[in-house]
Structure formats: C-alpha cells, structure tokens
Amino acid sequence: MYGEQTSQIQPGIKVIHVDKRFGKVSVLKDITMEVKANEVFGLLGPSGSGKTTLVKLIAGMAEPSNGEVYVSGVRMPNLNMLNNIGYMAQSDALYSELTALENLAFFAALVGLNGAVRKQRIEEVMQLVNLANFLKRPIATYSGGMKRRLSLAIALLHRPQMLILDEPTVGIDPVLRKSIWDELRNLSQSGTTILLTTHVMDEAEKCTRLGMIRDGQMIAVGAPDELKQSTGSQTLEDAYLVYGGVRK
Amino acid sequence: MRVRSLILRIVRQFFHDKRTLALMILAPLLILWLVALIFNGNTYHPKIGAVDIPRHIVVSLDNQGAVVQSYSSNAAALNALSLQKLDAAISFAGGVPHITLEGSNPSKSKTVLLLVQKVLLQPANPAPSQMQPPVIRYLYGSATMSSFDNFGPVLIGVFAFFFVFLIAGIAFLKERTTGTLERLMATPLRRWEMVAGYVVGYGIFTMVQACLIAWFAVGVLGMMMNGQFLYLLSVTLLLSMTALTLGTLLSAFANSEFQMMQFIPIVIVPQIFFSGLFSVDNMAPWMRRLSEIMPLYYGADALRNVMIRGKGFSAIWPDLCVLLAMSLVFMALNVFALRKYRKI
C-alpha cells in the first residue's frame, strides 16, 4: 500500500476488504475493487446481489462494517467529498409536487451552485437529457423514463469528478440510451470517473471494465472481452454463469 | 446557504399542494367555528314545562322565545324533564317560583335562566322587591359547569397541535418513503441542517396558522380574552413548534402515512384527555402526573391563564420554557434519529 499522502492525490475509487452487515444479514462479503480515473466501471449482477449497497458505501451514504472505502484518496464517508460526487439513486428521488426546474434549483443549491452559473448548468444538463422543453412541468406529470433522465441531470449538475449511477438507463428508450451512453463516454474522456450498476448484459458490454457481483461477493473483475475470453464464452451472460459456478 | 434552499423548497411544495395548506390553516378554524356554533348558539329555544303558573307569565315566556308546555302536576313535568323532553320545569309554591333545570348542558341551562329571569323581572309582574328570588334546582350537573369560554382556550391548543403534528409528520415521512431523504444524504447537507430547514420552513406556515387561529377565536368567535393578544400568539406558536418537532421526530418510527395516522390515538388523544378539557381530579395521583410529560398540558395551561385569567408573562413563562425545551429536545433527537440514513 502507498502512504496516506500519495493516495490523496490518486483519483478513482478504492474499496479494500469491505464487509457490510445489516443486523445478522451479511450483504457484502470481503469486496476489494478499484476504479481508475477515466474509467466507466460497471457493476453487473442481479437484483439483490448487493450492487446498490456497495454503491451507497462508495457514495458515502453508509459506512462499511469492516474494511475501507477511498474516493480520490479520501476515506469515506466524508461530507466534503460529497460535493465531488454526482449520485443517481435507483429510485427516482424527486419532489413530485415541484416542477423540474424547482427540483433542479433545490439540488443545485445543496451542492453550492447559485445565480447565473446555476441557471446555465440547469439549461445544459436538461439539453443533455433532452428535457429542456419540460422544465416548467410538475414531476407528477413526468413518465418513468423522463424521471430517470431528470435524476441523471441532477447528478450531473455540479460537474462532479465522480459519477455514481445506480441503474441509470432503466425505462429509457434505445435512442436516448445511446445518446446518454455517448455523453457518459465524453465525460469519462474529459476525466470523470464513472461507476454504474446494471443488470442488462448489452449495457455491461459498453463499460471499460466490469465487476460481477453475486450474493454479495465479487466473482470476477475485468474488461468485458477479457471476461468472455478467459471463460471461453460467447456472451457476458455465459461468462457470468461460469464465474457464478453454475456452468463449467 | 443549504438550509435556506431547503426552506425555499418546502415553501414551494406547500404552494403546489394547496389542499394541505388549506387543511393546516383552515381546518382548525372550521372546527373551532363548529364548536362555537354548538356551544355558543344563541338561537336555541329552550323547552320549558309550566306547572300551574299564571297565564301572563306563560305568554311572556313564549314571547321571549321559549317553547312552553303546560303540565298538570309537578310529577308529570319532572318525568318529562328526566326523559329529556324539557330543559326546565317551572312551578310556583307560596308565590315563589321554583325552577328545576335538566342541567346536563351548561349552555342550555344558562339560556333558560337568563330567559326566566327576564320574564320574572318584567313590569307586568309584581315589583321586583316583592318578588321572591326563584329557587333553582338542577336535575343533573350544577351551576358551576364549564362552557365554551372555559374550554375554548384548550381547543385552540388542541387544534393547532393536532394539524401541525400530522402534516409535518407526514411531510417528513414522505421524504423517507419517496427516497428523497436518502438522496439528500448523498449531498453535503448536514443532518442538523435538514432538521433546521424543516423547522423554519414549516414554522413559516405554522406562524400563519397560529395568527389565524388566535385572531379567529378572539375576533370572530368572540372567545373570552382577558389577556394580551401577543401572549396568546406566542403560546400558540410555541405549542405548534412542539407539535412540528414531535411530528417530524415520530415520523422516523412510521413506515407509511397510515402508520403515521396510528400515532393519533397514541400521541394526540391522551394529550386531549389530560389537557384540561376533562377533569382529571378523580384520577389516581400518579396517573395525573402523566400530564407533566405532555406538551398540550403546558400549552393549555398557559392559554387559559392568558385568555380567562388575563395573566401576563410572569404567569406563563414556565409553560413557555417547557414548550421550548421540549421542541429543542425533539429536534436534537431527530438529528440523532437521522443517523439511520447517514452516520455523519
């Protein structure tokens, strides 16, 4: 291990021997992983495998029972670090009585965006997720996919160094999904570290590297092609089955 | 500032949800008004049974708005009285009027007595000096029973408390159930900022509610008001603050709006029983002391002191201090309860 000083200037995410228990139920078992800067790292696993719990530990919303989590070299949870993280929850955490603009303004203020900068960023992110024409509409009138896109827009507001997206593209149509993925790649090339969870295999293919999670354990880590090659599988689904011990 | 943005958001939500706003602000007024109508109604026509009384008295009772019915004997009238067909029975014995009141409802008794007194003092009757004062008896109850003026101040407290408790509690709960609370914990918002934002954001509407209730009770309903309006306002406001902080705290222990409603019989109803609406003198002494942990008890005590006894700050400051202390404790506990969502 490097000392504290060197790790502080290291971008990216480090998870070291992390366990998470809720009461007697063990949700994460000895997870160790690393996400490098400029990577789009995907966590692949079925629902209930512990993806969301792991993501919350990294986003600083919960503390591991054992082990350590570092974001850009800072031990999590850490309040100041939260300003550098853009988080998109699995369930759309929006205020349905308010309009999209009011939701955006609220979350923008929480991360310290004000005045002209706030206004400009709100316009930019809403263009990006193709919702610019729906700014004044109350969230109650939004469809499921529109809410997902707005959640993503909120996560992007403050240009965070680190994007943590829990199931970002559920309910979004293929055309828009492609444009969101293009944008994620752009962000990653300009230096943003992206961690996302998914249970959709074709989406997992688009990640730089993948971590496969099953029953709270990391069963494999690697680039999608690597994972397929080393198991001799045609698809990621097959590879997942091999690593999960279901298929030889 | 983050607290300010939270406050702004709450205010905006309120204006998008006008029905909840109306419930919080207008419902207490509506209920107070209904209670005032029931207990203060001056259009009530009392039913009086007359046993062998002079014809001109029957006529003037009638003129005063009473519904007079004649009975042949005292026994028959008393029987009708006990069956609640009459509010009072009047007879003369040796030139002295005897009035028997049903008595279970103080406002009806009062109406009857006022009316009968007016009739007996009329010039058509013998000069008042010659007239023996009437003998008044009560079938049930007594002359000293309370009236709206007596429990009105407590009602102000009860309704202010009830609606703020429920609405603030459910709003905070919604923040949990929709996942926005968890989402907020992924922002640099601190737990105390969250609680403070709610207290001030809702406090704005609570203040409007307190002002309206106080003005409505005194100005429109004409509730007895012997003290300073400012004291009435500060007691109502502090009591609502306690309800606000308690409601948001208890929402941590509810998983749904339905479970929040379940706090009504547990948190609200016992407080109403101990608030002074009902006499607790017959209760075991240790049980009576339960009232000492109830915010409404202190609020009602202060409200009565201000409105009925016309007392000032020197009499109500202990109550105000207790309410303030309770609010601060509930806030602190809530900041602690939010640890469930984020440890720092």
Image: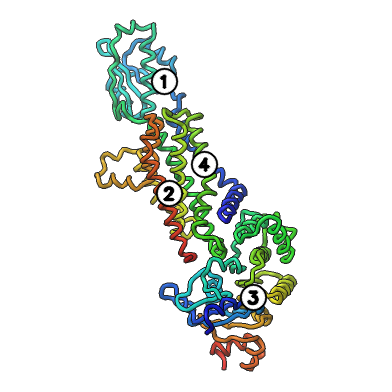
Q: Which residue is mark 3?
A: A193
Q: Are marks 3 and 4 in contact (CB under 8 Å)?
A: no
The crowding category of the residue bearing disc 1, from other C-alpha atoms within 10 Å (few below 14, some 14 to 19, many at least 20), is some
> The residue under label 1 is which amino acid type?
Val
Q: Earlier in the sequence, mark 2 or mark 1?
A: 1
The answer for which chain carries disc 2 is B
Give me the residue at 29% from left, 29% from top. B140
> Does A120 sit left or right of B232 as displayed?
right
State how far apart marks 4 and 2 are (Cα): 15 Å
Which of disc 4 and disc 1 is earlier in sequence? 1
Which residue is the site of mark 4? B207
Q: Chain of mark 1?
A: B
Up-down: is A17 above or below B183? below
User: Is A143 located above or below residue B19 in the figure?
Assistant: below
Q: Amino acid at mark 2?
A: Ser
- Type of amino acid under label 4: Met
Report the quarter where the C terminus of chain A lies.
Answer: bottom right
Same subunit, labels 3 and 1: the answer reads no
Tell me residue A235's x, y (percent).
Answer: 66, 87
Residue type indicated by callout 3? Thr
Residue tagged 1: B67
In this rendering, does residue A140 appear at all? no
Q: Could you tell me how far apart the alpha carbons at marks 3 and 1 are, in whole angstroms?
A: 87 Å
SS class of the residue under badge 3?
strand
Q: Say if labels 3 and 4 share a chain.
A: no
How many neighbours does mark 2 have within 10 angstroms: few (below 14), some (14-19), or many (20 or more)? many
